Image: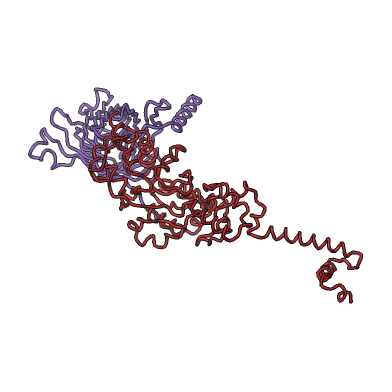
Chain colours: A purple, B red
Amino acid sequence: MKKLVFVALLIIAGFNCFGQDVTQTFNSTRIINSHSTEILRKKMWEYRIEHRFGDIAGANGGGQTAFGFDQAADIRMAMEYGITDKLMAGLGRCKGIGRPYRSLCDLFLAGRFLTQNKEKRVPVSAALVQTLYYTYMKQVEDLQSVAYFDNKLSRRVAYSTQLVLTRKFSDRLSLALMPTYIHRNYVSLSDLNDLFSVGFAVNLKVRKSMGIILEYFANVESENFRSDALNSLGVGFEFVTNGHNFHINLTNARGFGELQYVALTQENWLKGQFRLGFSISRNFKIKKS
Amino acid sequence: MPIKNVGKKIVQPYCIKIRLCKFGCQYNNESFKMNKFLLALCVIFIVVLYSFNSGESEWRKVSNSDAENVTLENVRLALGAEKSSFYMESFDPEKAKIGLELILKGKTKRGLFKSKAISSYFVCTDCHNIGREFKNSSDQNPSRRLDFAEENNLPFLPASTFWGIYNRTSFYNDDYIKKYGDIIKDAKQSLPGSIQVCAKYCSSGRYLKSWELEAIMHYFKANELKSKDLSLTNNQKDAISRIQLLDENEKADLLASINSAFTHGYSAHFAETMPRDDRKYGAGGDVVTGKFIYDKACLHCHLDGRVTFLKLDSDKLSAQMFLKYKSTYDDLSVYQIIRQGTYAMPGRNQYMPRFTKDKMSDQQIEDLMAYLTQLAEK
């Protein structure tokens, strides 16, 4: 087994060393909610502002809430950094959707270990993303609530591991597959500590700087638990400029981070419970001199 | 006293005798012939000795092939040219090595630590080649530069090559004054000064420390032009090999011909963006040349955003993006961006330098457009 792993690592290293790598499979480090295989270049910083409004329609939407503009389902601000050309880290803070988490911080490390290469016949790019979540919200007094942390730090922590596989089929079309595992240290009785979900995404570039994205996460879980949980589905429009990346999207997921959009989505598109969202990222380098 | 009888002719042997006495020899009449022989030997010895010590002596004995490896600076100095303000007697290979590392990477290892990067955004080779760019060392024609780049698979860059920069006497020439103003006042005739301007302003970085500047200067000195690098006639090469035997007129003629055989300063004429009515949008352009320019000029920096935020690839979408703006004066019009470049600004210091008329011709822009048109229609 060890030999097999060693050989696999050698092959991966070999694939990464030679030939012309396929670039720009996705335009940014995110698809809609999920990570992509794009990694910030070494020493490049990225500041991200992401926003999800309230429901466009349904009981909580419509004209009374200006189709969701009156509400902010979640807001995330993050600073991310390219450690090497294939490894990046980020620290973000979300408002949190409040069900159960608010004041949610995330710290992630993303590394691309395989890059699609035409000459070397590497069919896909692959990245691994490991995220740590921590909520510093004030704990509630209700002993039945998940937000009753009993002053234990471990109850405030969750983790996610995401493998992102992408392939650029043509200049215009890219696909992604995102098997995702989430572990929460503390959940309610009707919930599961460990969750597994498989994401799927399509990126269709209309022009060099514009693209349409579709992203869907199918949760793999027992029917006996998490009866309220729904799968996350998002459609996005992407616009890239020199150093900026804009996303405008419609999604039923309220929150950011795998912990929220995979595990805690309960909104139904068919009931109008989808929302407008956007993300803006700005790349820059810090001048040291 | 024997000196009265022998007259002047024996004064020198007598003197030699005195000298020889210092070495323990004794003078007498029988050894007089021997002393003549010793005198001749000493004269030869002294001549040989001085020929080794003289800075100009290398010319007496060099063969034609050796003369080709003599540095251009030494040739010019031997012909009576003045030393440049940044003249260096010799170079230190270790410092030159550090200089090369600074040029390629922008930093080097010093002791246990890496030195601070000269620029967070650029390294020298993003804009400058370090090798030869022309077959003829006095050439500046952009078409022939491209031909040479294609033959040797070189990047086709907006700035002048470092090859032979030590032998240049003029920097930031012509229209660069329009862009940099007084910043280049002290750099125009000074190689160290122009290196500092480039490090601070052109690369959005910082001024070099003295050891960094010295190392880069040593690298440039190590790669100065040699006689063989110049496109000289056989007669000129022959004249160089017997340079000390030339009279003043011959030296002046040779110096003039050598001065015209290399580039003292690269021309830099800014061009206006081509007016819409003059643009051919690639019609009649050479697609193969255009592809080379795209690969070796555009993608040199833009491939996957290596240097800049604008990511380009050899794909249809990149080409379509340029074609969309081809008739505009927008930054995404190749007619505009090649001629005007962009300027560094906070948050976007990775600006694009312009290609002067001397570095890329209008026809080459049309060749590029021809390739982009073909790529967009793929």
What is the number of callouts on the image?
0
Judge from the rendering whether residue B300 lies leftward or rightward of residue A196; answer left or right: right
**Picture layout, residue B104 above or below residue A207:** below
Q: Residue furthest right?
A: B30
Residue A206 image offset from top left, x and y in percent:
23, 32
Q: Residue at the location (44% across, 32% down)?
A: A16
Residue A269 image offset from top left, x and y in percent:
16, 29
**Picture layout, residue B240 above or below residue A279:** below
Judge from the rendering whether residue B92 lies leftward or rightward of residue A281; answer left or right: right
Residue B330 image offset from top left, x and y in percent:
24, 45
Residue B361 image offset from top left, x and y in percent:
35, 44
On the question of residue A88 being in view, the answer is: yes
Residue B59 sits in quarter: bottom right
Residue B170 sits in quarter: bottom left
Q: Nearer the viewer, residue B294 or B37?
A: B37
Q: Residue furthest top?
A: A223
On the question of residue A143 being in view, the answer is: no
Residue A140 sits in quarter: top left
Q: Nearer the viewer, residue A147 or B4?
A: B4
Which image quadrant: the N terminus of chain B?
bottom right
Which image quadrant: the C terminus of chain B?
top left
Judge from the rendering whether residue B132 lies leftward or rightward of residue A45; answer left or right: right
Q: Nearer the viewer, residue B131 or A223?
A: B131
